[in-house]
Image (cartoon, coloured by chain):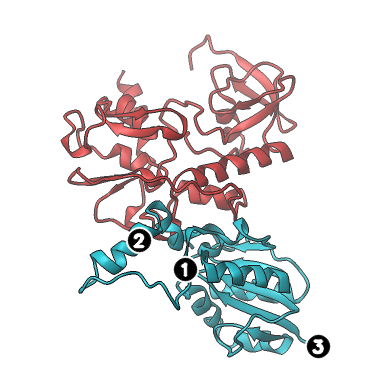
Chain colours: A cyan, B red
Amino acid sequence: MTKARLATVWLDGCSGCHMSLLDMDEKILEVAKVADVVYSPLVDTKDFPENVDVALVEGAVSSEDDLEKIQRIRKNSRFLVALGDCAVTGNVAAMRNLFGVRAVLDRSYRLTSVPAGSPPDQIVPRLLSRVRPLHEVVAVDLTVPGCPPSAGVIHHVVTELLAGRTPDVTDLTRFGA
Amino acid sequence: MSPKVRIKTLKIDGRDIGAREDETILQVARENGIQIPTLCHLDGLEPIGACRLCMVEVRGSSRLLPACVTRVEEGMEVTTKSPRLIRHRRMILELLFAERNHVCSVCVVNGKCELQSLAVALGMTQVRTPYRFPRFELDASHPRFVNDHNRCVLCARCVRVCDEIEGAHTWDIMGRGVNGRVITDLNEPWGESNSCTGCGKCVHVCPTGALSEKGTLREDAGKQRDFLPYLTLMREVRR
């Protein structure tokens, strides 16, 4: 039996969703029996590969790099899951939308930095004017709210998807859970 | 019960039900164990039909009617659940989330919020409308309470409890539609209000984290809403 190709992605989030994913402890071995993790912050693949069966995406779309990545992820994945509140709603990552990029960068690099610096203009990706949840940028197949969704919920979502079923998470998790 | 009160018979979701003529569809439905989602409604306060989540279908009417302010009528046939109603309720809820900054994960009432619970109850795991991200100032001028417009749904429970129960009428709503917001006195800082008695009823009836007590978070920020029916009942007895 060929194993399913599973990817996990960390965009603009705190990595809490990935922590929660790891929190499923030994159950992750069950997942490893039926799926290969072909891309993840936890493995050493640099570029998002082709032919991914299930992509779990944590975090909102915040920078030019995020935007490029999520488009590639969508193109190369059969099933895309928005994992956690940042991916689903923007959540804390999107709170900067109230102030605008310039005010936020000024505050971080000039006003509160000693000595005052200036925002980087090379190497790190440029921030988009607005942080957006995944579904405002690409089509999303399943939204799993939670900050973070519990290990149990993530395990349920992954095992159901790998078994070819689309899980219903409405009774299992919620915004801010 | 006054002898003049008549009984009306109607159908809710196909069930034959008897009700007092002065009752609303919502009251009768709840008495009979039929759940209709509500947000602005609170037992003990005058219903105002602001949130529209309790909309129901009534046979013969092409419009949807808010159950909380619609009185029962003889022979009425009410439907409380239909694909159309579910669609509309989901839409209303999504618009509420999109209108202000409801960031549940960092909210003082995370896990104790009626808006959040409604999302679960109505199976809403995504807001399809673009979020507006409006910018609001927080009013923390009161020594004990905070007013955070980011979380307000304009249910006007605070306005009603302050007027109807406390009798102070400190709260009001200023502006219309998307620009509406709750204000204290004549849009003055809460802490400088002359009319506010500091009773805290508004904080406890607030369904979200818009009004909260300073220094409380999560579990401690739980609101006690059951005081209202007792209070109104005791006052009626005394009258």
- In the image shown, does A160 or B18 lie closer to the viewer? A160
Q: Which label sits on residue A104?
A: 2
| Residue kind at label 1, given as amino acid type | Arg
| Picture residue at 56% right of the left edge, 62% below the top | A145
Give the number of the mark in front: 1 or 2. Answer: 1
| Picture residue at 58% right of the left edge, 51% below the top | B127
- Spot occupied by residue B184 in the image (x, y as percentages of width and height): 26, 32
Residue B111 can be seen in this image: no
Per the model, the C-alpha gap separating discs 1 and 3 is 39 Å
- Specify the subunit that label 3 lies on: A
Asked if disc 3 and disc 2 are in contact, CB closer than 8 Å, the reply is: no
Q: Against A71, is A132 above or below? A: above
Give the number of the mark in front: 1 or 3. Answer: 1
| Residue kind at label 2, given as amino acid type | Val
- Spot occupied by residue B17 in the image (x, y as percentages of width and height): 67, 27
Q: Earlier in the sequence, mark 3 or mark 2?
A: 3
Per the model, the C-alpha gap separating discs 3 and 2 is 47 Å
Looking at the rendered structure, the secondary structure element under dot 1 is: loop
| Picture residue at 45% right of the left edge, 72% below the top | A14
Q: Which label sits on residue A126?
A: 1
State the image quarter where residue B19 is shown: top right
Looking at the rendered structure, the secondary structure element under dot 2 is: helix
Tell whether B218 sits left or right of B133.
left
Q: Against B58, is B143 above or below? A: below
Circles 3 and 2 on the same chain: yes
- Specify the subunit that label 1 lies on: A
Q: Which label sits on residue A2?
A: 3
